[in-house]
Amino acid sequence: MSLIIRIHRTGGPEVLQLDDAVVGDPGPGQVKLRHTAVGLNFIDTYHRTGHYPVPLPSGLGLEAAAVVSAIGPGVEGLHVGQRVAYATGPLGAYAEERLIPAERLVPVPQGVTDRQAAAVLLKGLTAQYLVRRTHVVKAGETVVVHAAAGGVGLLLCQWLRHLGATVIGSVGTAEKAELARANGCQYPLVLDASNPGRFVQQVGEITQGAKASVVYDSVGKDTMLMSLDCLAPFGLLAMFGSSSGAPPPLDLGLLGPKGSLFVTRPTLMTYAAKRTDLLQGAAELFDLVARGVLKVHINQEYPLRAAAQAHRDLEGRRTTGSSVFLVG
Ligand SMILES: NC(=O)c1ccc[n+]([C@@H]2O[C@H](COP(=O)([O-])OP(=O)(O)OC[C@H]3O[C@@H](n4cnc5c(N)ncnc54)[C@H](OP(=O)(O)O)[C@@H]3O)[C@@H](O)[C@H]2O)c1
């Protein structure tokens, strides 16, 4: 028997239930994993609440680092004992053991620990596609990052600085502002959601009226309209999350007068759907981590049984950087 966290109904953190499971042998194309560290992501809360509906009962979690413990028929290129990680599910990472399609796995290189891999793969692959594919960020650009001290946020700030961009960030507290600043965000601004005009004004002052070429917005409801006002003509709003709630429907008519703006709603699932893209993104990410260009800030650690507390902390804006569940 091994431990698994499941939801049998949607709701608050209290619906996260500790179950015992028997994990069988891997079928064709599958491997069996013994997890060592499991990543906590904001999307886990959307699955738990039903904001993103999933068939019930369901496991939770899309990301983990693990050791391969058995290999199913037809799987090539993996061996028992190998260190691997994944970040695109299927759901069920909150568990000591699981079966998974081999095609979802990436090898973890020597210079990256299991904890780092579980803390960085999903968030770092997201940062990778946002700065290298959704928009190819160039040195000298000015970019706005919301939730700059969060999991994806700290990685985005570091990666953008590495590319030579000027980073303006929004954060919830002065302490988070200092953390963002220490990670490449030159202008961390404490955002007052009740006064979005103030943030737009600050972006205008910092850029001497030029504004930003891209806004990476994962906050959603509280920030979307304000984000449009932070953009220079032809600028791009990459609306990649909704931590404050789903944003209102967007009136396309706003985009013309604000400067012929572009808007996209990207997801990692699309950007990592092709295995070649997944492997290339992971290789680029792990290389930057192993070389110390990207620091992985694991600022919260929990046992799996404390999953409900972990969700409360994440939704309550009490976390910074990455959070992991340690297993075994
Ligand atoms: N589309 C994709 O491919 C993709 C992939 C990964 C993640 N995401 C999205 O990116 C976002 C960040 O994910 P993460 O796991 O790294 O989480 P996170 O940023 O560490 O946590 C969310 C942060 O959002 C900010 N926030 C602002 N208003 C909030 C509110 N009303 N309630 C809760 N948080 C609020 C908080 O920072 P402050 O207190 O500093 O404001 C909070 O710490 C999420 O929206 C997630 O869904 C999208």
Image: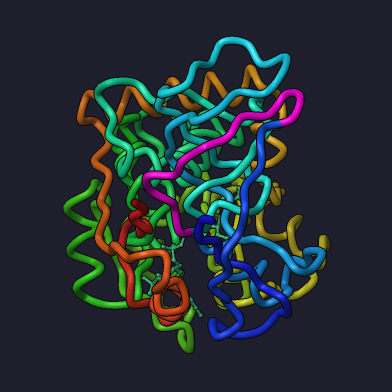
Q: Nearer the viewer, residue 253 or 247?
A: 247
- Quarter of the figure that contains the N terminus: bottom right
Query: Which residue is the extreme one toward the bottom?
Result: 194
Q: Residue at x 75, y 64 (%)?
A: 254
Specify whether residue 156 is in view.
no
Q: Residue at x 82, y 63 (%)?
A: 253
Query: Which residue is the extreme one toward the top?
Result: 77
Q: Nearer the viewer, residue 12 or 145?
A: 12
In this picture, is 69 found above or below 266? above
Q: Position of residue 82 (x, y in %)?
A: 42, 22
35 displayed left or right of 102: left
In this picture, is 194 found above or below 98? below
Q: Nearer the viewer, residue 56 or 179?
A: 56
194 displayed left or right of 115: right
Q: Position of residue 325 (x, y in %)?
A: 37, 58
Q: Residue at x 41, y 37 (%)?
A: 141
Q: Position of residue 40 (x, y in %)?
A: 45, 59
Q: Nearer the viewer, residue 261 or 168?
A: 168
The picture quadrant where one finds residue 229 is: bottom right
Residue 36 colored magenta? yes
Q: Which residues are magenta?
A: 27-40
Specify whether residue 21 is in view.
yes
